[in-house]
Amino acid sequence: MTRRCIERGLVAWLTGLPGSGKTTVARLVAERLRSEGYRVEVIDGDWARTTVSEGAGFTREERLRHIKRIAWIARLLARNGVIVITSLVSPYREARSLARGIIEEDAPFMEVYVKASLETVMKRDPKGLYKKALQGQVKHMTGISDPYEPPENPDLILDTEAEEPEESARRLYEAIKARLPREG
Amino acid sequence: MTRRCIERGLVAWLTGLPGSGKTTVARLVAERLRSEGYRVEVIDGDWARTTVSEGAGFTREERLRHIKRIAWIARLLARNGVIVITSLVSPYREARSLARGIIEEDAPFMEVYVKASLETVMKRDPKGLYKKALQGQVKHMTGISDPYEPPENPDLILDTEAEEPEESARRLYEAIKARLPREG
């Protein structure tokens, strides 16, 4: 593998309900880009909440602070040539708009809506969180006890009910490649 | 300027009392390395506390969390070829040891003690914080109401009482260059 040094990367900001498939798609795209020599970081919520955002809670205020923090970190990475794929529920329009404002000072920002109905994600329930939320064991569960505000004008929509993860990944990969600066 | 792409960077972790000269030295070194084409980020406390670490306080527990967060961010950057110079008081040995543990999973870590006596930094008092602390207007002021635990075995000591900032910067620059991986 030859390392590709690009002057700046970008941030693909995946948003969607828990279980919509954000991290699955992010990892597939990261793997492909890495195999081509790009520097890539996937920042997903579970990872962030045990490292850079340890102790962050789930109230509206805490979510806003968490999202702003991740936006700053993504900006630092992207301006140093890293392709950043964030995989966070990021349910509030206000928070995603703040993230865009922070990142676009230094690097391109794409809002990617990873779309699946509540019915579908509750069936998938990969972490068992919906079940727990319905039993009252998880507070602030997006889709159940907390709102999810879908993007009004996303740069890309990945409908994970209508397409397989590989197809979503291919479309995200192509959207990212189209936005990268020319090399040289 | 030709961009230099190195496979991984490193983290130079500057620690010292407020007013010891950490940020002054960090900026001089960053400027020189950038002029040579390296990717460099300076993470100083004032910046971090308004961006990635917004809302972090100054109790021992909050400082520990803040330091761990910065360590994770520095690790992400350094493993992507960025030279990171942190400029944080980071008064606790325990916190610096945690930072080293986090960073060394992915990149070299240098502890750099920016040394100046309390008498000297109180005279310099560039932000007027010592004055305020003595008047009881600033709580948790390192050196006054909070402890500073000097490094026991730092990788480098910069004595900013005995040498000019340019001399400290030259010595830090050389220590960093000696630890960078070979290019190519």
Image: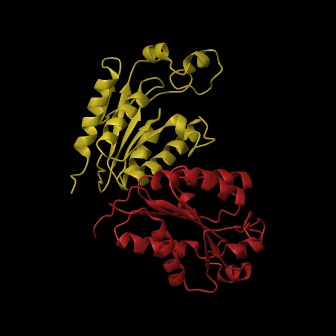
Chain colours: A yellow, B red
Residue nearest the observer in this picture, B79 or A130: B79
Apparent side of residue B106 relative to residue A108 in the rendered image (left or right): right
Residue nearest the observer in this picture, A67 or A38: A38
Residue B1 picture quarter: bottom left
Q: How far from the left and from the top, in percent, is residue A40?
A: 38, 44
Residue nearest the observer in this picture, A108 or B129: A108
Give the vertical position of A82 relative to B154 (above or below).
above
Q: Quadrant of the C terminus of chain A?
A: bottom left
Q: How many marks?
A: 0
Give the vertical position of B81 relative to A161 (above or below).
below
Q: How far from the left and from the top, in percent, is residue B27?
A: 48, 72
Say which residue appears at 58% left-offset and 63% top-offset.
B45
Residue nearest the observer in this picture, B10 or B119: B10
Apparent side of residue B138 relative to residue A84 in the rendered image (left or right): right
Say which residue appears at 55% left-offset and 86% top-offset.
B164
Apparent side of residue B137 relative to residue A32 in the rendered image (left or right): right
Q: How far from the left and from the top, in percent, is residue B165?
A: 54, 82
Q: How far from the left and from the top, in percent, is residue B67?
A: 62, 55
Residue A59 picture quarter: top right
Give the vertical position of B163 relative to A30 (above or below).
below
The answer to whether residue B53 of the structure is visible from this angle is no
Say which residue appears at 36% left-offset and 47% top-offset.
A39
Q: Quadrant of the N terminus of chain A?
A: top left
Say which residue appears at 22% left-offset and 42% top-offset.
A178
Apparent side of residue A12 relative to residue B59 in the rendered image (left or right): left
The answer to whether residue B60 of the structure is visible from this angle is yes
Residue B7 picture quarter: bottom left
